[in-house]
Image (cartoon, rainbow, N blue to C red):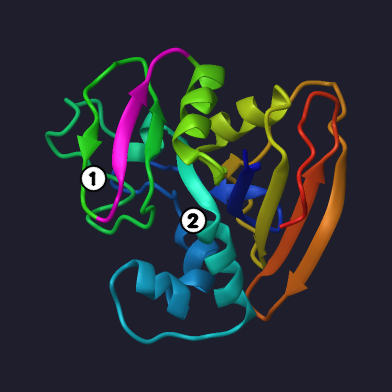
């Protein structure tokens, strides 16, 4: 069994999306700035079926963040931002037709639906029994691979708070959003200890990786 990890971009003041997020504006006002560092990288463009792009340490880290992943978990709103029937327009919202996963994705939702098969090895599965059951199913699908908790913020918070995350990788972007959705709000009063395992800096982003050493979390090898 691999590691369970979180990987997300955030502003220097701790936001993963700007204010006024909506279906039409899923990253909120100014939130697109948090992901600009990745758009021209060769490794990201390749996942979108595009040629060219920059090859540098940032590009290598993007490769790392996907190559060991056997399955993903995400919240329903991050999946499609829509309350309509599963499959009517499943990629409305954040993803469009560009799916970067290439592995099974398990969606935390209150409404069970049949699996939705797409291209490139991505099948979306609904899970209605909560975060622990979602993780069990995701780990089964991942096999020896890692599980990536993709978000949104509340899903990440729940997994971190309950001690189910082994590693956290943050891509800290040099911008202050001032408002929006914070990464780790309302975690409670119990301290969650982290061990820093890597820092990689570039002009566009600083990559921070931590091992969760809190009681209840599973230690993993530094990947």
> Is 221 one of the magenta-colored residues?
no
**Image coordinates for residue 56, horizontal then vertical, percent:** 59, 84
Instruction: Calculate the distance from the C-alpha at mark 1 to the C-alpha at mark 2.
Output: 19 Å
Q: Specify which label sits upstream in the sequence, 1 or 2.
A: 2
Give the residue displayed 68% in from the left and 53% down from the top. Answer: 169
| Kind of element beneath mark 2 | helix
Q: Which mark is residue 91?
A: 1
Q: Which mark is residue 31?
A: 2
Q: How would you rate the neighbour count of disc 2 (Cα within 10 Å): few for under 14, some for 14-19, many for 20 or more?
A: many
> Looking at the figure, which quarter contains the N terminus?
top right
**Residue 21 falls in which quadrant of the image?**
top left
> Looking at the figure, which quarter contains the C terminus?
bottom right
| Kind of element beneath mark 1 | loop
Q: Is residue 80 visible?
A: no
Q: How would you rate the neighbour count of disc 1 (Cα within 10 Å): few for under 14, some for 14-19, many for 20 or more?
A: some
**Image coordinates for residue 193, horizontal then vertical, percent:** 87, 37
> In the drawing, does residue 54 fall left or right of residue 93?
right
Marks 1 and 2 close (CB-CB < 8 Å): no
Q: Is residue 7 visible?
A: yes
Give the residue displayed 42% in from the left and 85% down from the top. Answer: 53
Q: Which mark is residue 204?
A: none
**Image coordinates for residue 133, horizontal then vertical, percent:** 50, 18
> In the drawing, does residue 62 fall left or right of residue 196?
left
Give the residue displayed 80% in from the left and 63% down from the top. Answer: 198
Residue 88, placed above or below residue 94: above
> Is 122 one of the magenta-colored residues?
yes
Give the residue displayed 55% in from the left and 55% down from the top. Answer: 68
Residue 81, placed above or below residue 195: above
Q: Which residues are magenta?
A: 120-129
**Image coordinates for residue 44, horizontal then vertical, percent:** 43, 70
Nearest the viewer among 32 and 1 is 1
């Amino acid at each position: 069994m691999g590691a369970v990890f979180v990987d997300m971009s955030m502003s220097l003041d701790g936001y993963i999306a700007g204010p006024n997020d909506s279906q039409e504006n899923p990253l909120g006002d100014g939130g697109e700035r948090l992901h600009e560092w990745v758009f021209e990288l060769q490794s990201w463009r390749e996942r979108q079926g595009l040629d060219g792009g920059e090859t540098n340490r940032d590009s290598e880290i993007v490769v790392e963040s996907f190559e060991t992943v056997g399955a993903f978990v995400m919240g329903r709103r991050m999946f499609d931002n829509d309350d309509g029937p599963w499959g009517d327009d499943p990629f409305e919202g954040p993803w469009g037709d560009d799916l970067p996963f290439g592995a099974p994705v398990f969606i935390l939702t209150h409404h069970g639906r049949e699996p939705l098969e797409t291209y490139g090895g991505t099948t979306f599965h609904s899970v209605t029994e909560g975060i622990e059951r979602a993780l069990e199913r995701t780990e089964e699908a991942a096999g020896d691979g890692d599980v990536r908790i993709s978000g949104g913020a509340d899903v990440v918070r729940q997994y971190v708070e309950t001690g189910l995350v082994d590693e956290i990788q943050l891509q800290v972007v040099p911008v202050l959003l001032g408002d929006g959705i914070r990464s780790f709000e309302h975690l409670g009063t119990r301290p969650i200890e982290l061990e820093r395992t890597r820092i990689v800096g570039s002009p566009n982003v600083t990559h921070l990786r931590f091992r969760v050493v809190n009681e209840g979390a599973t230690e993993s090898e530094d990947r």
